[in-house]
Amino acid sequence: MRKLMVWITVNAKKGMRDNLIKILDEPFGHAFTVKQKGCERLERSIDQQNPNCLLLTELWTSRDDWDTYFDLGQKVRDQNGFNKRLGEQLEQDGIQIVFSDLDEVPLPD
């Protein structure tokens, strides 16, 4: 089974990037994600051409693990208000998610 790469683009409203990062750094943000079964890596970067755009890269053992995490995360984050606070920082349609199968390239000896 191939591992799953998840590419997430998050577009903050102008001037709201730092607030967005603070929310993502809360216990139900990135810390919640990396504790889930199957999450092997999560990286966050800032787009050099658009400072209001965050790029998240996640590595998961499988799409099933990510789907389980996402469903649980939606439920928990809706209940505790995380998703509402997050959404207030975002442009309309501010999150795009792309999935790809990881195809590891062998390195030369």
Image (cartoon, helix red, strand yellow):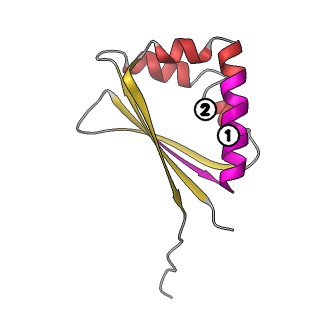
Q: Amino acid at mark 2?
A: His
Q: Are marks 1 and 2 in contact (CB under 8 Å)?
A: yes
Magenta-span inclusion, residue 73:
yes
On screen, residue 66 above or below 52? below
Residue at the far bottom in the pictured view:
109
| Lateral position of residue 75 relative to residue 86, left or right | right
Q: Position of residue 6 (x, y in %)?
A: 53, 49
Q: In which quadrant is the N terminus drawn? A: bottom right
Q: Name the residue rendered at 51%, 88% in the picture.
A: 109
Q: Position of residue 102 (x, y in %)?
A: 55, 64
Q: Which residue is mark 1?
A: 34
| Lateral position of residue 50 relative to residue 83, left or right | left
Residue at the far left in the pictured view:
49
Q: Amino acid at mark 1?
A: Val
Q: Which residue is mark 2?
A: 30
On screen, residue 103 above or below 19? below
Q: Position of residue 78 (x, y in %)?
A: 66, 17
Q: Name the residue rendered at 63%, 11% in the picture.
A: 81
On screen, residue 100 above or below 79? below
Query: Alpha carbon of mark 1 to alpha carbon of mark 2: how far?
Result: 6 Å
On screen, residue 101 above or below 93? below
Q: Name the residue rendered at 68%, 56% in the picture.
A: 62
Q: Position of residue 65 (x, y in %)?
A: 72, 48
Q: Name the residue rendered at 44%, 15% in the picture.
A: 19
Q: Specify start and end residues of the magenta stretch as a single range.
A: 56-75
What main secondary structure does the magenta stretch of the protein show? helix
- CA neighbours of label 1 inside 10 A, class few (<14), some (14 to 19), many (20+): some
